[in-house]
Image (spheres, rainbow, N blue to C red):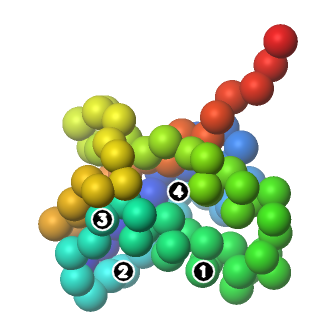
Amino acid sequence: MKIKLELFGASRDFSNKDYLEFDLKEKIEIKDLRREIIDYLDINFKGNEDFIKIVKSSAFCSEDNNIVNDNFKITKDQKIGIIPPIGGG
């Protein structure tokens, strides 16, 4: 199963593209995808703590543009967006 993770905001620093791709063997939930992203960051950015904080605090959206919770099941090839919190004043 292929997941195309669309990167928004600060998460765009995770790649020189505006997405990451994960090839997974089984159905997963968003909480599992978070772990996959953190594993990717551990390998490619030596566990950059700022990047990991972004993943842990981000919302995710389905390809239907609905915000989904950590128990949302990904059961087929699809796009998922990661939406980091936005700071400002």
Provide residue 52's location: percent of width, then percent of height: 70, 63
For the residues carrying marks 3 and 2, which lies nearer the camera in this image? 3
Taking the spot 61% from the left edge, 78% from the top edge, the residue there is 40
Provide residue 72's location: percent of width, then percent of height: 26, 54
Can the viewer see residue 28?
yes
> What's under tag 3, amino acid-wise?
Glu
Q: Residues within 10 Å of mark 3 (few under 14, many from 20)?
A: some
As measured in the structure, the alpha-carbon distance from the residue carrying label 1 to the one carrying label 2 is 13 Å
Q: Is residue 34 left or right of residue 28?
A: right
Residue behind mark 1: 39
Q: Quadrant of residue 2?
A: bottom left
The answer to which of marks 4 and 1 sits earlier in the sequence is 4
Residue behind mark 2: 23
Q: Is residue 62 left or right of residue 87?
A: left
Do callouts 4 and 1 mark residues in contact (Cβ within 8 Å)? no
Q: Residues within 10 Å of mark 1 (few under 14, many from 20)?
A: some
Q: Say which quadrant the C terminus sits in.
A: top right
Residue behind mark 4: 19
Secondary element under disc 2, as helix, strand or loop, is strand
Above or below residue 37? Residue 12 is above
